[in-house]
Image (tube, rainbow, N blue to C red):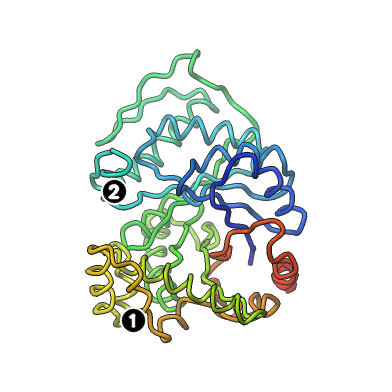
C-alpha cells in the first residue's frame, strides 16, 4: 500500500519546502486538492523540487476547463515531471458548478466521459500525428494546426484518475481510467459491497483487470499520542463527516449503513446554515466506521488491516502534511507503511 501526502493548495511560496520535505521523509506521492486555490499550479513547483514522488491533482474540477485546456496542462506537467504526473478530475456537485464556478450542469457522467476521451484524442494527435476528429454530444474538436500543437514527448501515457462515489461514475472509472479517488466519506463495507462491484462492471466492459486500476482515498484518522490533540482531531473529523453526510450526492454510504435518517437531518441543518449543530448527529458508531484511531505508529497496521484484500492501493490522511508539525508522528507512520 502506497502512502501519500495530501496538500491543500497553498500559497505557492510554500510549495518548494512542502515538496522537498514530503519527498525526503518518504511519501510515495503528493496530491493537491482544489479548494481555495488552483490545483495545477502548485504541481509545477512540486515537479521542479522533487525527483521521485508521484504528483497529482486530487481533484481538479473538470467542467470549468475545456478538454483542450486540461489536455495542454496535463501534457506539459507530464513532460516537466518526467512522467510522474497524474491528472485527477472530478465533477463537483451541481450547486458549486452553477453558483460558484459559473458553468452549466448537465449529465455529469456522460460529460466527464467525453472529457476523458477528448483529452486522449488530443494526446494521440500530438504524440502520433493522428487527425483530430473528436465528435461528441458536448464537445466537437476537429481543428489542430501546427501553431497550437505542442508535439510529442517521452511521457505520453498520462494516467487519469476520477473521483467516484456512485454507481455510474464508478463504472466509468473502471471502464476508462487508471485510477479512482474514492471519497473520504467511505467505509470498508462500502468499498467491498458497493464500490468494487461497480468498478468491476466497468472493467469488464473493456476486458480489463482489477490490477489495471488503482484505488486511492483520503482516510479520516485520529492520532491518539496526545490526548488533547486527539480530541481536536476527533472534533474535526466529526465536523467534516457531518458536512459530507449532509450532501445528497454522497448519500449512498449512509443508506448502506442504515443512517439515512441522520443524513436527512444533517441536510436540513445544512440548508439552514446551522453548521455547529451538525457534528452532534455523528454517532460513535459512525465515527468507528469512518475514522481509524490509534497512535501515529499504530495507524499504518490498522489501516492495512481495515483495507486488506485490495480495498485500497494508495492512502493519504485527511490531515494535510505541514512541515514542522507532527514530524515524529509522520515519520512513525511512514516507517509503518514501508514495512511489509
**Local crowd at mark 1 within 10 Å, few (<14), some, or many (≥20)?**
few
**Residue 75 pos. (x, y %):** 55, 33
Q: Does 178 sit left or right of 297 as displayed?
A: left
x, y percentage for residue 163? 42, 55
Q: x%, y% of residue 273?
A: 27, 63
Q: Quadrant of residue 243?
A: bottom left
- Please tell me whether residue 64 is drawn above or below residue 327 in the rendered image: above
In depth, the one of 126 and 312 nearer the eye is 312
* Quadrant the N terminus occupies: bottom right
Query: Going by the image, does 279 lie left or right of 103?
Result: right
Q: Could you say which is closer to the camera, residue 123 or residue 330? A: 330
| Residue located farthest toward the bottom when viewing the structure as drawn | 285
In the rendered image, the quadrant that contains the C terminus is: bottom right
Q: Is residue 75 above or below residue 108?
A: above
Q: Which residue is mark 2?
A: 108
Q: Which residue is mark 1?
A: 257
**Measured Cα–Cα span from mark 2 to mark 1:** 26 Å
User: Along the polypeptide, which appears first: circle 2 or circle 1?
Assistant: 2
Q: Residues within 10 Å of mark 2 (few under 14, many from 20)?
A: some
Asked if 232 appears above or below 315 in the picture, the reply is below
Seen in the image, is 241 located left or right of residue 55?
left
Front residue of 270/194: it is 270
Which residue is pictured at 52% across the width and 47% down the height? 57
The residue tagged with tag 1: helix, strand or loop?
Answer: loop
Residue 176 x/y as whole percent: 42, 49
Do the residues bearing badges 2 and 1 touch, measured as CB atoms within 8 Å?
no
In the displayed structure image, the side of residue 215 where residue 170 appears, left or right:
left
Amino acid at each position: 500500500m502506497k502512502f501519500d501526502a495530501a496538500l491543500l493548495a497553498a500559497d505557492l511560496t510554500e510549495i518548494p519546502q512542502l515538496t522537498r520535505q514530503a519527498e525526503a521523509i518518504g511519501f510515495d506521492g503528493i496530491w493537491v486538492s482544489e479548494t481555495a486555490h488552483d490545483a495545477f499550479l502548485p504541481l509545477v513547483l512540486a515537479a521542479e523540487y522533487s525527483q521521485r514522488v508521484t504528483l497529482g491533482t486530487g481533484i481538479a474540477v473538470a467542467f470549468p476547463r475545456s478538454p483542450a485546456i486540461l489536455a495542454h496542462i496535463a501534457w506539459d506537467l507530464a513532460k516537466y515531471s518526467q512522467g510522474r504526473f497524474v491528472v485527477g478530475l472530478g465533477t463537483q456537485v451541481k450547486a458549486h458548478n452553477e453558483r460558484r464556478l459559473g458553468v452549466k450542469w448537465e449529465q455529469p457522467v456522460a460529460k466527464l466521459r467525453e472529457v476523458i476521451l477528448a483529452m486522449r484524442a488530443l494526446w494521440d494527435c500530438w504524440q502520433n500525428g493522428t487527425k483530430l476528429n473528436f465528435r461528441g454530444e458536448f464537445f466537437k474538436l476537429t481543428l489542430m494546426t501546427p501553431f497550437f500543437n505542442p508535439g510529442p514527448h517521452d511521457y505520453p501515457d498520462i494516467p487519469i484518475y476520477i473521483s467516484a462515489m456512485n454507481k455510474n461514475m464508478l463504472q466509468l472509472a473502471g471502464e476508462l481510467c487508471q485510477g479512482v479517488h474514492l471519497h473520504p466519506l467511505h467505509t470498508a463495507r462500502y468499498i467491498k459491497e458497493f464500490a468494487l462491484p461497480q468498478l468491476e462492471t466497468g472493467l469488464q466492459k473493456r476486458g480489463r483487470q482489477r490490477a489495471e486500476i488503482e484505488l486511492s482515498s483520503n482516510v479520516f484518522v485520529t492520532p491518539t499520542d496526545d490526548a488533547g490533540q486527539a480530541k481536536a482531531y476527533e472534533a474535526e473529523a466529526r465536523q467534516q463527516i457531518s458536512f459530507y453526510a449532509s450532501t445528497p450526492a454522497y448519500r449512498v454510504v449512509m443508506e448502506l449503513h442504515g443512517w439515512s435518517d441522520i443524513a436527512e437531518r444533517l441536510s436540513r441543518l445544512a440548508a439552514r446554515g446551522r453548521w455547529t449543530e451538525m457534528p452532534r448527529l455523528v454517532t460513535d458508531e459512525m465515527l468507528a466506521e469512518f475514522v481509524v484511531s490509534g497512535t501515529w505508529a499504530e495507524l499504518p497496521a490498522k489501516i492495512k488491516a481495515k483495507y486488506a484484500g485490495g480495498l485500497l492501493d494508495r492512502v493519504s490522511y485527511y490531515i494535510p502534511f505541514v512541515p514542522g508539525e507532527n514530524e515524529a508522528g509522520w515519520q512513525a507512520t511512514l516507517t509503518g507503511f514501508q514495512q511489509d
